[in-house]
Image: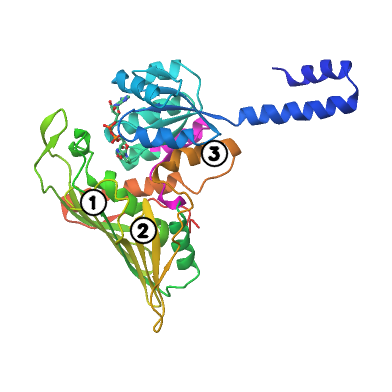
Amino acid sequence: MNDSLTRAAFLQKTSLASAALLLSNLELFAAAEEKIIKVAIIGCGSVSNRYIVHLQSSPLVKIVSLCDIKQDRAEAQNKKYNIGASTYNNINALLKGNAFDLMLTLTDMQMHGALNKIALQAGKHVWSEKPLANTYAEGKALVDYAKLKGVRIWGAPAVVTSPQFEFMSKTIQEGKLGKLASAHGQYGHTGPTWSSFFYEPLGGSMPDLGVYNMATLTGLLGPAKSVMAMTSIVNKEREIDEKGIVKVNEEDNAHILLEHDNGVISHIMCGFNYFDPFGHEAKNQTLHSIQIFGDKGNMRLIGYDWEPKSVVLDNSWTEAPQVVQTDDGGYQWQEGATHIAGALSKNIEPRINVLHSLHVLEIIEAARKSSKEGIKVKLVSSFPFPMV
Ligand SMILES: NC(=O)c1ccc[n+]([C@@H]2O[C@H](COP(=O)([O-])OP(=O)(O)OC[C@H]3O[C@@H](n4cnc5c(N)ncnc54)[C@H](O)[C@@H]3O)[C@@H](O)[C@H]2O)c1
């Protein structure tokens, strides 16, 4: 609609004052309309159940399309969540179908880079489940390409948006732990059973699980300069639902050492062989999974960084450790895409930064190289720090 013509025609027929009032109302309405971000989801498997419900809680989001190579999955989700979207069975049909602003890539990990590239080429913004590409070079090319096309790409996880992350970051930045030295993060369960891609080449426990601790520890301590790691395959075979026994080709057990600035060293362990009575959901975990040590204090994050419960702060020689930041402020790990849609809608810069996701991707690749070749691997990537 040509706005100036509409104004001129309208002003001829009404008094200036009432027209101005009505127009400003119309403009407000138009602006509100424009702010709704149209979302297309590609990959309608397990994680889409969490994403769809969260997206539906936002007045700024409309899910207009669902796509899965198994189209019956897209149709089933459309019906289950009463979405009213169009469904497709491949990305080209999706791009030719309903117009949308933001594509959510929720497919097998190995497909993310290629699908994200096609969406960027079509001028769409992208929120990608982790990893956003299979290699650092592929991820960097996507970020550079997005810039060229004037669109944006972001990648999961969204751990940096939790109030517990914010509290821990501020506590460190305010110097309450003194001079930092060491940190540890761990996350594992006994492994997914619903899809085999987790165990296929370029799957593995690092891009699926370790990625959370990598984002948290680099987010709190700063970019890593180098990586040393040992990875292994503990279970050579896995039984996958509706598929049977598959061979495990990517690491299901990993220990990663990160060298940060100022002598700080952190350690992450992740795997698909970790007994945890709370399983994949981990909602009721009351033990800590992240520890940060300085010479004047230490902190433990209770729960997981993607499902945080509270922080235990121990920085007194005389007082007992305090349990703080018990409120999660409604944070949910699956909020990343809703958060990004909100940022696009309001035209604000979100805390989640794609350069941080790229850095984590480089760490994963470097850890594989380090373990394979028995060497320390230097990193080239970085991201704006501190994040909070
Ligand atoms: N399941 C979870 O709880 C969970 C949590 C956090 C993150 N993730 C991440 O989400 C992603 C998906 O995991 P999932 O557990 O939902 O897997 P899933 O196997 O349940 O679902 C993946 C879906 O993608 C579809 N797909 C594959 N290739 C496609 C293509 N080229 N075009 C369209 N559709 C395609 C598959 O048919 C399948 O339905 C992974 O990156 C995983 O690491 C999963």
Magenta span: 141-161
Asked whether mark 2 and ligand 1 are closer than 8 Å, the reply comes as no
- The first of marks 2 and 1 along the sequence is 1
For mark 1, what is the residue?
Answer: 188
Q: Residue at x 79, y 26 (%)?
A: 23
Is any part of residue 364 visible from this angle? no
Give the structural element (helix, strand or loop) at label 2.
helix
Q: Are marks 1 and 3 in contact (CB under 8 Å)?
A: no
Q: Residue at x 31, y 18 (%)?
A: 71
Three-letter residue code for mark 1: Gly
Is residue 387 or residue 307 the one in the foreground?
307
Quadrant (top left/top right/bottom left/bottom right) for the N terminus: top right
Give the structural element (helix, strand or loop) at label 1.
strand
For mark 3, what is the residue?
Answer: 342
Left or right: where does residue 347 sit relative to residue 178?
right
Mark 1 → mark 3, Cα distance in angstroms: 31 Å
Magenta segment includes 223: no
Q: Residue at x 50, y 69 (%)?
A: 174
For mark 2, what is the residue?
Answer: 217
